[in-house]
Image (cartoon, rainbow, N blue to C red):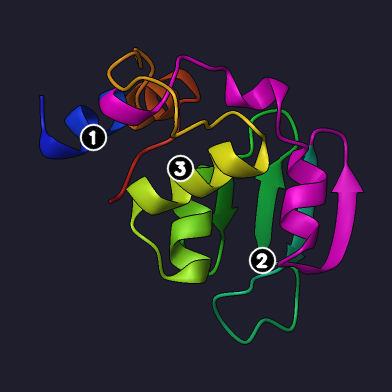
Amino acid sequence: MNEEEQYMKKFFKQVNIDEHIDYERFYSKYLKNMKRSNDKITAQCPFHDDQHNSFWFRISNGCWKCEAGCGGGNIITFLAKIEGLSTREAYKKLLKEAELLDENKEKGKMKYTLNDYSKEKSCQLNS
């Protein structure tokens, strides 16, 4: 178990973040020109000067990709990249936003890690 997983086990409980995050609302804070098509939303990529909608994400699981080559991943990697955070900080911020984090409770009860989330959503984790 690496240092990141050990940290996560100390602070977070087991959750399915998909039940608590509205991905369309979350991404709308960062994206322009959003257009919905079934389970996918396209938009202008926030990581480069985009004149066309080269960025997309899935509404069902929050996984994203820039077709112009800026990367891809899950909601955690997106938040980390856009706000200049570590993946650990981004995960913690998402749990706080979803009101799933209570740092005052006893530590050491988490069984669901950032890597577990990434594997479950079939998104590659690039930390």
Quarter occupied by residue 7: top left
Of residues 21 and 54, the one drawn nearer to the viewer in this rendering: 21
Identify the residue shown where x is 12% and y is 37%.
3
Q: Which residues are magenta?
A: 10-39
Disc 3 is placed on an element classified as helix
In the rendered image, residue 78, in percent from the top left (x then y), is placed at 52, 55
Is residue 38 on the magenta stretch? yes
Q: Amino acid at mark 3?
A: Tyr
Tell me the residue at 22%/30% (across/down). Answer: 5
Q: Decide whether residue 32 is among the magenta residues.
A: yes
User: Disc 1 to disc 3, how far (Cα)?
Assistant: 11 Å
Q: Is residue 61 left or right of residue 91?
A: right
Disc 1: which residue: 7
In the picture shown, does residue 40 fall above or below 53? Answer: above
Camera sees residue 72? no
Q: Which of the two discs, 2 and 1, labels the residue nearer the N terminus?
A: 1
* Amino acid type, label 2: Ser
Helix, strand or loop at disc 1? Answer: helix
In the image, taking residue 35 as reference, residue 4 lies left or right, namely left
Residue highlighted by disc 2 = 54
- The answer to whether residue 118 is left or right of residue 37 is left
Residue 91 numbered tag: 3
Tell me the quarter of the image containing the N terminus.
top left
